Each structure stands twice: as structure tokens, then as C-alpha cells.
Image (tube, rainbow, N blue to C red):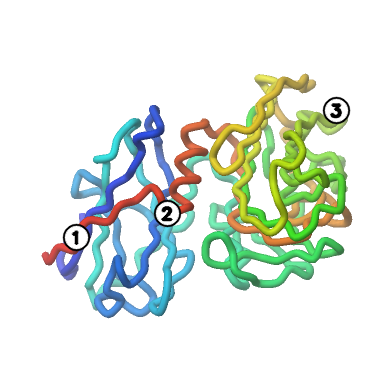
């Protein structure tokens, strides 16, 4: 419960009418500007923001991705449950407490199966999950993103390495990769947005456990393998599904146990197909290399364009989850009620 000191609040309603199932531990993006909050009523970095569940007592973890008192701010909040087919489920946003400490808890926001979350805002390449496999930049530069800022890749050598031998997708039966992408060119057979390598004794290799990107015929590509020696399994959408110079949200769901790959574009299923993985889980060994903007070894099949909001999950996200995430990230999920004085 938010006790004392807070003077203002607004009710935030969720539009989950289109999704029939409940969303559990769901990260909601709250987009704030001067029509939704009086920045003069908040601390300079938004430290006094607090979010409370509909029960009026449970304080929800949040992470401020970007705070801009002269423009738009972006805040992620983990909500315990949003009911299916509902437009009345809600939370409260409290502010207006000049004595409040910073209340952020990023790792708590991204605890529901997330193994890597990269906002890629300005120079911040950190992983918001715990323990955090932070990125190391090799050439990419800050650029306007789909949400706040993202990173621009030159398609020649730019990449972001995600640690050395991180235990990404280690011993999992399913995975979900997602990212916002805006291609400037799709010169390669595969232009990888995010790739997670197999182990191979600690040496990064091309055909990884899971990869997500675009193909030169303007399609979305998803692939992976369940063992380090398996023939790589992949699926790609029809040609000319995407256009250069336009932002898209792409998602790949790989079910090693169920022998399926599904591809989503802007929250909608674009393709689902059956493949034959060798075993139902990935090996219980680390990933020897993972990258944003290139293949697993960081040396080829570079992405030419912009990438933002990369997610790596050790679970299969449902179609409802993916659709609601797209709605949330395009500011179509939250409705602000009037300001209330406490």
C-alpha cells in the first residue's frame, strides 16, 4: 500500500477485450506525457511514481525506461493478473510526493520466464532481468526507436554481444524471441535481430538454439535446434511480408517438445508449422555466444537497420500474450482516468 506523502493518483484501465485468456505477471507499458501527468507534480526523474493493483494495497514493481519531462516517458509495470475479455481491470498510478525515494525494481518486472530484456535506450545495453547478461557494443549507435530509443546497425559489422557463455535457453522445452525491427536493407539470406548460440564446448557457432530475424525476400525467419549436433530447423513466412523503412514487431515461438515453430507479426500469427526436433529440451549447458544484430558468432549475417526492445524468454508465450504485448507497446492497451487529489 502507498502510505502518506502521495497527493495525486490516476486510474489506469486495461483493454484486454480482444484476448480471451487472463494475462498473468504481465508487463504493461505505461506511456506518459504532459496530457497524462503534470510533470511539475513529480520528481525530476519520476522517482515518486508508484503503481498499485486494483485491490488498492499491492504495490506493483515498475521500471522507468525513459523519463522526459519535455516529452514522452515510458514506464514498465508488472501486473499480477489482467482478466481475459475485460476492459475494467485496472491499476492505480500514484505521484506527487516530493519526499519519495526511487521505487523502481526492474528485475521484479521481468521475472515471468524472461531470460533477457534489452530496452536499448541510448547507451544503456543492460539486461533488465536478474542476474542480467548485459550487452557489449560493437559499432551500433543510438537512434530513435519504436519505444523511446533503440540501436542502429550498419549491416556490415555492427553487433551487440550478450556476455560470455551465458546460460540462455539452457535446459528449456520452449522459447520465445521478440524484437522491434526496422530494416534499411535485407541483403543477406538471413538478417538476424537476435541469436542464441548452441554450446559447442564454448565456441559460438552459426546454427544456434534459437534465432529471429528477416530474410532477403522480406520475410520473417525463425529457427533453432534442440541439441548441439542437430540439423538446424527453421521456418520462414511468405515473401514480401515486410517492407524496408517501417517498424514491425516480430516474435518467434519455438516449442522443442511440441515440434512446432510459430511466427507473429505485429501481434498476429503469420505462420505456424511442424518441425522435427531431436529432443524435447535444449541441453543443460550454457550458450557459448548470443548477439543482437548478427548471427551467434557475431561475425556475419548482420542486421542493417534499427532494433529495439529485444526479449528472450525460456517459455512459449501464448497468442493472447503476444497480441496484448503488441497493443501495450503501441499505447493501445491503457486508458487514463482523471487525476484524483488525495
**Which residue is denoted by mark 3 in the rendering?**
230
The image position of residue 160, as x and y in percent, is: 74, 61
Task: Say which label, 1 or 3, has the lower sequence index.
Answer: 3
The image position of residue 138, as x and y in percent, is: 78, 67
Q: Look at the picture and state if 117 lies above or below 113.
A: below
- The Cα–Cα distance between marks 1 and 3, rounded to whole angstroms, is 56 Å
Residue 165 badge: none
Front: mark 3 or 2 = 2
**Which residue is denoted by mark 2 in the rendering?**
331
SS under mark 3: loop
SS under mark 2: loop
SS under mark 1: strand
The image position of residue 231, as x and y in percent, is: 87, 28
Front: mark 1 or 3 = 1
Residue 338 badge: 1
Nearest the camera: 305 or 53?
305
**In the visual, does 59 lie left or right of 223?**
left
**In the visual, does 111 lie left or right of 32?**
right
The image position of residue 280, as x and y in percent, is: 70, 22
- Identified at 44% across, 63% down, the residue is 74
**In the visual, does 139 lie left or right of 113?**
right
**In the visual, does 80 lie left or right of 156?**
left
- The Cα–Cα distance between marks 1 and 2, rounded to whole angstroms, is 18 Å
Crowd around label 1: few <14 · some 14–19 · many ≥20 (10 Å): few
- Identified at 72% across, 51% down, the residue is 193
The picture quadrant where one finds residue 236 is top right
Amino acid at each position: 500500500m502507498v502510505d502518506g506523502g502521495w497527493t495525486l493518483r490516476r486510474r489506469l484501465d486495461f483493454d484486454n477485450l480482444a484476448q480471451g485468456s487472463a494475462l498473468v505477471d504481465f508487463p504493461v507499458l505505461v506511456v506518459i506525457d504532459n496530457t497524462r501527468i503534470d510533470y511539475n507534480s513529480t520528481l525530476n526523474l519520476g522517482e515518486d511514481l508508484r503503481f498499485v493493483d486494483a485491490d488498492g494495497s499491492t504495490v506493483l514493481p515498475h521500471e522507468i525506461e525513459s523519463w522526459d519531462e519535455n516529452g514522452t516517458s515510458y514506464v514498465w509495470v508488472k501486473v499480477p493478473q489482467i482478466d481475459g475479455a475485460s476492459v475494467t481491470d485496472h491499476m492505480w498510478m500514484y505521484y506527487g510526493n516530493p519526499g519519495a525515494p526511487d521505487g523502481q525494481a526492474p528485475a521484479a518486472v521481468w521475472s515471468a520466464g524472461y531470460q533477457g530484456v534489452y530496452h536499448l535506450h541510448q547507451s544503456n545495453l543492460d539486461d533488465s532481468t536478474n542476474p542480467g547478461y548485459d550487452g557489449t557494443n560493437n559499432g551500433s549507435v543510438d537512434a530513435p526507436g519504436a519505444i523511446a530509443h533503440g540501436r542502429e546497425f550498419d549491416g556490415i559489422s555492427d553487433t551487440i554481444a550478450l556476455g560470455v557463455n551465458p546460460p540462455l535457453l539452457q535446459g528449456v522445452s520452449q522459447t520465445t524471441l521478440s524484437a522491434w525491427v526496422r530494416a534499411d536493407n535485407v541483403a543477406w539470406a538471413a538478417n538476424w535481430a537476435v541469436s542464441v548460440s548452441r554450446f559447442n564446448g564454448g565456441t559460438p557457432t552459426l546454427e544456434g538454439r534459437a534465432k529471429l530475424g528477416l530474410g532477403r525476400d522480406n520475410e520473417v525467419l525463425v529457427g533453432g535446434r534442440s541439441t548441439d549436433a542437430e540439423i538446424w530447423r527453421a521456418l520462414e513466412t511468405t515473401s514480401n511480408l515486410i517492407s524496408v523503412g517501417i517498424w514491425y514487431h516480430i516474435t518467434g515461438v519455438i516449442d522443442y517438445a511440441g515440434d512446432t515453430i510459430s511466427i507473429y507479426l505485429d501481434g498476429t500469427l503469420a505462420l505456424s508449422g511442424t518441425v522435427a526436433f531431436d529432443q524435447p529440451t535444449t541441453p543443460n549447458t550454457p550458450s557459448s555466444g548470443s548477439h543482437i544484430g548478427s548471427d551467434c558468432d557475431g561475425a556475419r549475417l548482420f542486421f542493417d537497420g534499427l532494433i529495439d526492445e529485444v526479449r528472450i524468454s525460456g517459455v512459449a508465450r501464448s497468442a493472447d500474450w503476444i497480441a496484448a504485448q503488441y497493443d501495450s507497446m503501441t499505447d493501445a492497451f491503457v486508458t487514463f482516468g482523471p487525476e484524483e487529489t488525495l
